[in-house]
Amino acid sequence: MTPPGKGWNEESLSENPGVEHLVRLGWTYVGPGPVNTERESPKRVVLVRRLSAALAKLNPWLSDDNLHRAIRALSGVQATSLIEANERLYTILTYGVALEQDLHDGTGKKSHPVRFFDFDDPSRNEFVVTRQFKVYGTKKNIRTDVMLFVNGIPLGIIECKSPTLGDGWKHEALDQFSRYQEMEERYRELGAPKLFETIQVLVATCGQAAVYGTVLTPHRFFVEWKTTYPRGATELEGILGRQPNAQEILFEGMLTPANFLDLVRNFIVFERDAQTGRTVRKLCRYQQFAAVNKAIARARRAKSPTDRGGVVWHTQGSGKSLTMLWLALKLRRDSMHENPTLVIVTDRKDLDEQIAKTFVACGFPQPRPGRECP
């Protein structure tokens, strides 16, 4: 054990173990020096060379001109706020961008979707972790502890603090996220909000404990991820030779390449408040992630419509409407049909209204009400 006072800092107690864990999970570590050479400038956050290689691999038909257009789609988004830019880029990243090109197949020049990730096969993407990623802001520069890139696009930030800070580690880490995003007036022009336009997951950790949120998440909504699903907890204990701590559980549950891409694609929504018009970005909790994936696995195993389903138990106010929304979203994306019909059956009218409001607030069409069962 490291003697007190010697090496008791965030780098040795939190950052180093975190990066080592990510490498075990399948991320490739690249030092800050090489990473910085891949950027156009310290104000730019996309690793262009890696993104170009990924686009060419996932879209082999892409011309050089369209490859450059696809890259510019990530930097040329017009928006009046961080949440607006983040939502627009999220749509581009998850659904792709349509570009016109003649594939010389006799059909002429047509619009074709360009993919930034292969969500179906995580092994066809490049997962890179680096540290001390410096970004120039308007008046002050920021330096993130750990950055997560997929195909050269920054998707995750991990802020590491020393456990020697006691309970103060969490406040210090989350306050740093607030400054980086300029979430409060006192932080105006002291951060670099541009970095967060493509970010999907924020993690604050101290080596022993960890919480997560997403872009513009208020401090009180950062929570723990308490499961290693789909890997069993005993399996992780066998690998570590001891009981895992909260940081290790979060890394296993959220940041394995397959789980990370699943979260990005299927478990993020932008919900609009009908009264204020304010948009809130929401990321699922671990119970919702496991419930949706287990339900879909059960549906795939079903041999006939009469096969038994299962039960997902929710307490009041725990997010059942969002669980149903994420289940519907993933079922629709996984369906072999182009426009599948999804049916949600409830046992009371107020629940119908609640679910409908959630779907509409998150940008889905108004559900068509069914008739009551006798």
Image: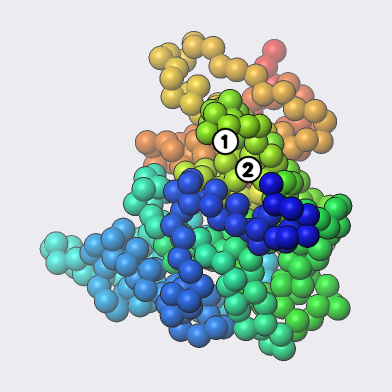
In this picture, is 270 found above or below 196? above
In this picture, is 269 found above or below 39? above
Q: Residue 92, position in %: x, y?
A: 48, 63
**Mark toward the viewer: 2 or 1:** 1
Question: Which image quarter: residue 354?
Answer: top right
The residue that label 1 is drawn on is: 240
Q: Residue 325, position in %: x, y?
A: 62, 40
| Residue drawn where x is 75% and y is 84% of the image | 189
Which of 332/257 is in front? 257
In the image, what residue type sits under mark 2? Glu
Label 1 residue SS: helix
> Relative to residue 217, is residue 341 drawn left or right?
left
Q: Residue lying at the far front in this picture: please name it.
A: 3
Label 2 residue SS: helix
| Residue drawn where x is 44% and y is 24% of the image | 300
| Separation (CA) of disc 2 from disc 1 | 10 Å
Q: Sequence order check: which comes first, mark 2 or mark 1?
A: 1
Which of 276/82 is in front? 82
Question: Which image quarter: residue 294?
Answer: top right
> Relative to residue 18, is residue 351 drawn left or right?
right
Q: Residue 70, position in %: x, y?
A: 39, 72
Q: Residue 372, position in %: x, y?
A: 69, 21
Q: Is residue 268 visible?
A: yes
The residue that label 2 is drawn on is: 248
Task: Look at the image and tell me in which quarter the C terminus lies.
Answer: top right
In the image, what residue type sits under mark 1? Leu
In this picture, is 168 found above or below 110? above
In this picture, is 200 found above or below 307? below
